[in-house]
Image (cartoon, helix red, strand yellow):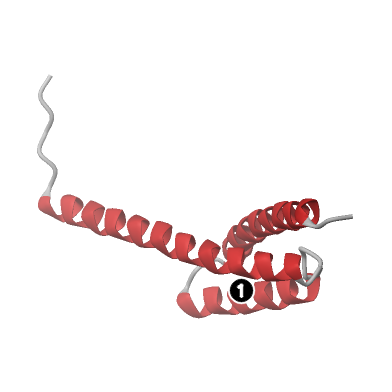
Amino acid sequence: MTSTPLPPELADLRRSIDNLDAALVHTLSERFRCTKAVGELKARLELPAADPSREERQIARLRALAVESGLDADFAEKFLNLVIDEVIRHHEHLRGAAGARQPG
């Protein structure tokens, strides 16, 4: 079974998508590096893992950026909620680990 060669335009678009996917992964990795540092600081200061007022501001900010960029704001909010849920899970884990290390 022989495959038909891709038109150059399709191959170019796919290369762009691949590059953008890589950039997304690297950007998420950097974001989680920063949020890990936040989680460690919160655990050390015995602050709650979640900050609902900050989360609300971030969601509103991201929705506005999405609209400005021509991206569906509901999709952007779903994506940020997924990221926030993961960050909170990490912060809760860090808080539990910090509490386990403290004597008494």
Q: Residue visible at 10% across and 38% down?
A: 5
Quadrant in which residue 4 is drawn: top left
Image location (x, y in percent) of residue 82: 63, 55
User: Which quarter shows the N terminus?
Assistant: top left
Image location (x, y in percent) of residue 35: 60, 66
Q: Residue visible at 11% across and 52% down?
A: 8
Q: Nearer the viewer, residue 85 or 9?
A: 85
Task: Give the residue at the far front of this rendering.
Answer: 103
Label 1: which residue?
63
Q: Nearer the viewer, residue 43 or 1?
A: 43
Q: Residue visible at 79% across and 51% down?
A: 100
Q: Considering the numbered disc 1 on the image, is that residue within a helix, a strand or a loop? A: helix
User: Which quarter shows the C terminus?
Assistant: bottom right
Residue type pointed to by label 1: Arg
Q: Is residue 48 left or right of residue 25?
A: right
Image location (x, y in percent) of residue 70: 47, 73
Q: Is residue 10 left or right of residue 57?
A: left
Q: Residue visible at 74% across and 68% down?
A: 44
Q: Nearer the viewer, residue 87 or 39?
A: 39
